[in-house]
Image (cartoon, rainbow, N blue to C red):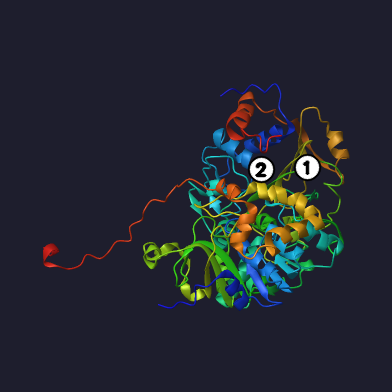
Amino acid sequence: MSTASAKDFTETELIVCAAAKMLARSRTVFAGVGLPTLAVDLAHRTVNPNIQLIYESGVAGAHPESMAEGIADSVVVSGAEAVVNMHALFGYVLQGGNVDVGFLGAAQVDRYGSLNTTVIGDWDSPKVRLPGSGGAADIMAGAGEVFVVLRRHDPAAFPAELDFVTSASPVRAAEHPDFIQPRGFGVSTVITPLGILRRRERLGELELTEVHPGVTVEQVQEATGWDLAVAEDVTQTQAPTAEEVRLLRDEIDTVRLYLR
Amino acid sequence: MHSDTVVSLPEAIERYVEEGATVALEGFSHLIPFAAGHEIIRRGISGLTFCRLTPDLLSDMMIAADCVDRLVCSFFASGSAGSLYEVRRRIESADPRPLAVEEYSHHAMTLRYHAGAAGLPFAPIASFVGSDIPGSNPDIRSVVDPYSGKRTYVVPPLNPDVTIIHAQRADRHGNVQIWGITGTQQEAVYAATHVIVTVEEIVDDEVVRSDPNRTLIPAHAVDAVCEVRTGAHPSYVQGSYDRDNAFYREWTPISKDPAKLQEWLDIHVRGTRNHAEYLESIGHHRLRDLLVDPRPSGVVDYGRRTQASEGNLK
């Protein structure tokens, strides 16, 4: 396979390719439709032919014959390897420890990787009402690790303090030592339009490890609402290869449903 | 044989859904019982506590029609599931009046139905440690695990007065067969005092009995079975018709404008006498486009014990 960098690529393609590369050693991924699905599909075709995608609808090992619109599209069911009910999915598959990587989105991320998907402003008198947990709080607690993809990087999305903690990092959970602690590592990776942040320790904080082409470390720090830790060896995010871009455009999302 | 399990949808709603009741309408993107929700709107039943993991278009409609005082849920749908502006108006600005919300996660809602169905006092859950969700919902509490001595969050049983689901088929006794995404239907049904199932088709007993594992809901759990074709539109029925994705997209501008939303309800729900008229108002050409090609399952063999006879005794 060609490893030459693509001549042109979009921000979305850069994010998807970065996520796909990180899935080289994961067995099971719990994800919604959208960029995470593209990343899993791309990983499957490049670095990890054995990866299995599990949807929040209970479908595992989907083989859709056309581009799925949503996690519960009939095309993800027809021809799938398995469909389980919600009790089995959230109880046995997720809480039982069978998910290696969970993908989550968020409106806000804090320095320890806690996520807000519930509300901007006060819970009692919200400025903007967001979708809420769905499975997010469960995925954070149960998945081996969590990848977060955010389409913006600014102090509002990366505040010093979240407006509401929907899905708590193990760092916050550890503030309640009398409770049984969640099994998951929490957020290991946050991919944004500016770069990649990672947490290396279960009780550690996010640090900047990669900046995208053309982005400086200072730019990322300024766009973050706390004093962002920076790894000693910050590298530049690997640009998508021509082959990865070809796969994304010509085979995976031919109708440009998610690649924009 | 006389069966009073098979009834019309209006009769089932009349019989079991009372003013102020706690009702669950379940179906995870698949098999959403829209026809039943519309019938509740037509009958003007109000004051409901409405339970559903993912309040979506159906909730937006029922809330706009003022059927609902309280939502019990885990996710306010958005994106491809449609934006719920009526729900948002009620929550963000109490417009036209406040809406009470009890919020959980998907797993917590599933466990609430499970505890309700299994007659348990509560169900423990590994989620929420460090989360603000328990602080916003006093019904998510914690207990000491008597084995480890550590605390765990628990959620209370959810026992709806009525659970309503839609399914591919049932026999006249109420044995309900579902395939595709099965969500939390089984738990929600067993948790309820009364159960209404709308189906695409009421089939001969022998059809059900040819594949007993496909029966997700046995007849003993069901009070009413109603044949309502295309009863899940605009959601879908695996193997019959696809989701009306265009409808979900069109809902956003309707939902954004309260006047348009009321007008939509007037034309398509309150202005129609039943589901057949609703489908008429939606347009049959549109529904035809949603039909899917067959992709039948393989046949499994349940076997039949060989009958002893001289012919096969060696």
Quadrant in the picture for residue A220: top right
Question: Which class describes the residues within 10 Å of circle 2: few (<14), some (14-19), or many (20+)?
Answer: some
User: Which type of secondary structure does the marked residue at label 2 adopt?
Assistant: loop
Question: Alpha-carbon distance for marks 1 and 2?
Answer: 26 Å
Relative to B203, A251 lies left or right: right
x, y percent for residue B242: 56, 49
Amino acid type at circle 1 is Glu
Judged by depth in the image, the label closer to the viewer, 1 or 2, is: 2
Q: Viewer-proximal residue, A238 or B137?
A: B137
Which quadrant: the N terminus of chain B? bottom left
- Which tag, 1 or 2, sits closer to the chain's start? 2
Residue A193 appears in the figure:
yes
x, y percent for residue A155: 87, 45
x, y percent for residue A24: 59, 38
Q: Chain of mark 1?
A: A
Relative to B276, B299 lies left or right: left
Q: Same chain, marks 1 and 2?
A: yes
The residue pinned by badge 1 equals A207
Amino acid type at circle 2 is Gly
The number of numbered badges drawn on the structure is 2
The residue pinned by badge 2 equals A34
Q: Which residue does the image show at 27% across and 64% down from the upper left?
A: B304
Q: Chain of mark 2?
A: A
Above or below, comparing residue A125 to residue A21 in the picture: below
Q: Viewer-proximal residue, B96 or A236?
A: B96
Relative to A210, A35 lies left or right: left
Above or below, comparing residue B20 to residue B282 in the picture: below
User: Which type of secondary structure does the marked residue at label 1 adopt?
Assistant: strand
Question: Which class describes the residues within 10 Å of circle 1: few (<14), some (14-19), or many (20+)?
Answer: many
